[in-house]
Image (cartoon, rainbow, N blue to C red):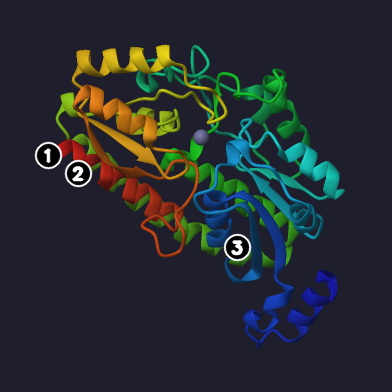
Amino acid sequence: MNRRIFLGLTTALAILPLSVFAQDRLPVVASFSILGDMVSEVGGDRVAVSTLVGPDGDAHVYSPTPADAQTVAAAQVVFVNGLGFEGWLDRLIEASEYAGPVVVATAGVTALETAEEGHEAHAEGDAHAHGDAHAHGDAHAHDEVKAEGADHDHDDHAGHDHGPIDPHAWQSLANARLYVANIEAGLTAADPEGAATYAANAAAYLVEIDALEAEIKAAVAALPENRRSVVTSHDAFGYFAAAYGMTFHAPEGLSTESEVSAADVAALITQMKAEAIPAVFVENITDGRLLEQITSETGAKIGGTLFSDALSGPDGPASTYLDMMRHNTTTLTTALGE
Ligand SMILES: [Zn+2]
């Protein structure tokens, strides 16, 4: 049954709950798990969300499968992060012959830029915001195919690193509000009859986002000033750092694609000793062995696992976006507060 017929039927049979037609929910695709959860929150029972890069997956280095092309081909809306995060996406969309809207969830976000690519990435100092108007000035979420394409101008160098733009915008709850607005607009454009549902779902979600934001700000603010500097595997927490007042160092840059050199590791160890950085945090999407080596040479402790670019599985501590943000904050503040 196509969606037009389905929408007609639901109008005619409005007293039946929509779940009766579960197989006829609006089929949408999200590029990675964190975004997929946000789309599910806003879409609710009206949408069926397929996520390409699943829990604990690394979207930086993802290789789409033929099944992904089929999933995209069957979608009515495709949601992506943008800011160069999904370097593999344009080719996937081309291969699938998908011609529908591509909603860039970061449209309107003030992108962070680092002064140099990767390594020595001091989230605090380099993360001054600037107006990234060239690709994301249009706040309308639908039909952003061109804006997404424009992002890839940064990616001239053979698909490595993202250039200086930090794609991890979801690590700030202020940005999450923009994601929600873009998702709502994208769903409403594709399914106007669901407008009221999407608006209500978004409004309820924003209440939770606001509450968690206040919680995180208070938790970080309670840390002593000299206990707010940490190390992670790759430079995924620039937006968190800027929003909540911490500093993150990482041996690897903005993308997990980059190679870590011995010199980078040595420089980081020197810096950690000089600044007495107390803890390092492994990430769910990366191999923690390098960090274990760093702790053994600095005396810093492993503070726990942060969820950077992907959710946990359903039974894990970060199976939704909000649980992820809460878990990361608790993990950081617990380790640093000791
Ligand atoms: Zn990342």
Answer left or right for 271 relative to 153.
Answer: left
Mark 1 closeness class: few <14, some 14–19, many ≥20 residues within 10 Å: few
Answer left or right for 203 relative to 15.
Answer: left
Quarter of the rendering containing residue 242: top left
* Mark 2 in CB contact with mark 1 (< 8 angstroms): yes
**What SS does tag 1 mark?**
loop
**What SS does tag 2 mark?**
helix
**What SS does tag 3 mark?**
helix
At a point 65% along the width and 69% down the height, the residue shown is 46
Q: Earlier in the sequence, mark 2 or mark 3?
A: 3
At a point 41% along the width and 31% down the height, the residue shown is 233
Q: Disc 2, ligand 1: is the CB inside 8 Å?
A: no
Question: Mark 1 belongs to which amino acid?
Answer: Glu
Q: At which x and y percent is residue 248? A: 34, 26
Cα–Cα gap, marks 2 and 1: 6 Å
Mark 3 closeness class: few <14, some 14–19, many ≥20 residues within 10 Å: many
Q: Which mark is residue 334?
A: 2
Please tell me whether residue 140 is drawn above or below residue 6 in the rendered image: above
Cα–Cα gap, marks 3 and 1: 41 Å
Q: Which mark is residue 43?
A: 3
Position of the C terminus, as image quadrant, is: top left
Please tell me whether residue 141 is drawn above or below residue 266 in the rendered image: below
Q: Nearer the viewer, mark 3 or mark 1?
A: 1
Question: Mark 2 belongs to which amino acid?
Answer: Thr
Q: At which x and y percent is residue 126? A: 42, 16
